Structure formats: structure tokens, C-alpha cells
Amino acid sequence: MSKKLIIAIDGPAGSGKSTVAKLVAEKLGYLYLNTGAMYRAVTLKALSAGVDLDDESALIDVAENCVIEFANSGTKTLLDGVDVSNELHLPHVDKVISDIVKIPGVRRAMVAQQQRIGEQGGIVTEGRDVTTVVFPDADVKIYLDASLEERAKRRYKELKEKGEEISLDEVEADMRMRDEKDSSREDSPLRVAADATVIDTTHLTIEEVIEVILHEEEIL
Ligand code: DC
């Protein structure tokens, strides 16, 4: 296929978006654009600069002035030139991020960067609003879902592998809270786009999900 597509994938935490998007991008030779990593980088910068998390305009200022770049086909995230990939998923980021990403000015700054990165096509992007707000005209729209229990297990395993001291119950409670906040915020809540293909990944392997995306959507 010669046209460079925009493939957009939304869904809650732990639904498999990152793994699937990364692999689909690799197969197609596309850029992987992880929009959650951008919000995580802003959160990290605000935390490390000691910004008051109740000060919306200071947070917007951080979002408007940080330089986020992707390296290694999108698998590494650079914040102001420094590789922060290993810090983005730490629990102290997860704890506060929902309150930062709901701020419209923060979202506007990130959406503008995301649209610039994707304007030529040839991307597989994932997040919470990439099928609805960032790329409403994406060529392919997918909504990935899975049960909360399964999603918490997946994230718990990832954190344990990184040596984090956290229980499965804590991970699940944290995820439930973030799901609620992401779905109920006023600006760009997580929702299923009318023209998205919904895939429940609870009982599917990564390969099966990729198969559905590439073949049902007739990309290959
Ligand atoms: O996908 P993730 O868990 O890395 O996302 C981190 C947070 O950022 C999560 O709370 C949802 C939010 N997010 C968002 O609001 N919009 C996006 N496009 C991507 C992520």
C-alpha cells in the first residue's frame, strides 16, 4: 500500500494499545506515536520542577514549553533532550497525571504537537482521544478494551519486572480511579468513536489482536 495511513488506537490503560501499536508500526515501517508518553513527560517535568499541581497556568506553561521528541522509531521518549523513557511509568507519575491531563490548555499544547507529528501520515498512534479529537479523520480507528482485572494483571506484571514494590490490589485500585477520571473529564474524555472497530483483548494474544487490525482493516 503506497498511501501513508494514520492508524489511531484508543482504549483504557492496560488494554494492550502500546504493545499492539508499536508492533503494527514496526510491521508497516511507520512511526509509533505514543500520546500518553507525551502527557507523562509533561507530568514528570512538572513534578521534577516542583510546580504546584493546583496551579493550572503554571502547568500549561510547562506543557507549552517542553520539547518532547521520540527516538528509536518512537519507543524512546526524550524530554528536553534527555531520555526519560524509564521514568514515565513510575507510580508517582500515575498518581497525579489524571489531574494534569484534564486541563484544556495542557491538552491543546499536546494535541498541536501530535497533529504536527502526524500531518504527513505514516503513523500508528495511541491514547485516549486520538480517534476522536486528535485525528478524527484517521484512516483506521480502533478501540481496544479488556476487563479491569486483566488490565490490572498486565500492568502489575510490567511494574514487578521493573522491580516496583506494589500490590495487585493497589494497581487495580489506581487503574479504576484513572479509568473513571479519563472517561468522565469534560475535555476529550475517553470514549468509543462512532466509526471505530472495537476489539476486546481480554482473551486474545497480542498476535491475534494485530491480525484483526491488519487483516480486518485490509491494511496489508
Ligand atoms: O496511555 P497512558 O497510560 O500512558 O496515559 C497516561 C495518562 O494520560 C492517562 O491518565 C490518560 C492520559 N492520556 C490522555 O488523556 N490522552 C491521551 N491521548 C493519552 C493519554
Image (cartoon, helix red, strand yellow):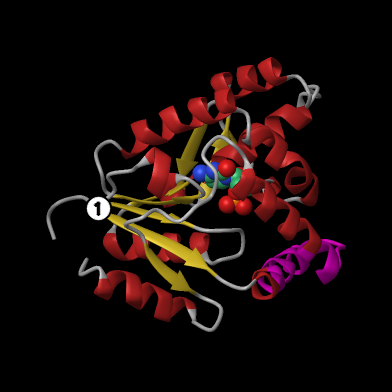
Between 150 and 197, the residue placed more toward the observer is 197
Classify 58 as above or below 113: above
From the viewer's perspective, tell me whether residue 11 is left or right of residue 152. Answer: left
Q: Does the magenta run of residues contain 158? A: yes
* Residue 147 x/y as whole percent: 62, 73
Between 151 and 92, the residue placed more toward the observer is 151
Residue 52 image-quadrant placement: top right
Between 3 and 142, the residue placed more toward the observer is 142
Which secondary structure lies at badge 1?
Answer: loop
The residue pinned by badge 1 equals 139
Q: Which residues are magenta?
A: 152-172
Between 151 and 206, the residue placed more toward the observer is 151
* Residue 138 x/y as whole percent: 29, 48
Residue 14 image-quadrant placement: bottom right
Taking the spot 65% from the left edge, 75% from the top edge, the residue there is 150
The answer, for residue 83, to whether it is visible in the render is no
Which residue of the protein is positioned furthest toward the left in this rendering? 2
Q: Principal SS element in the magenta part?
A: helix
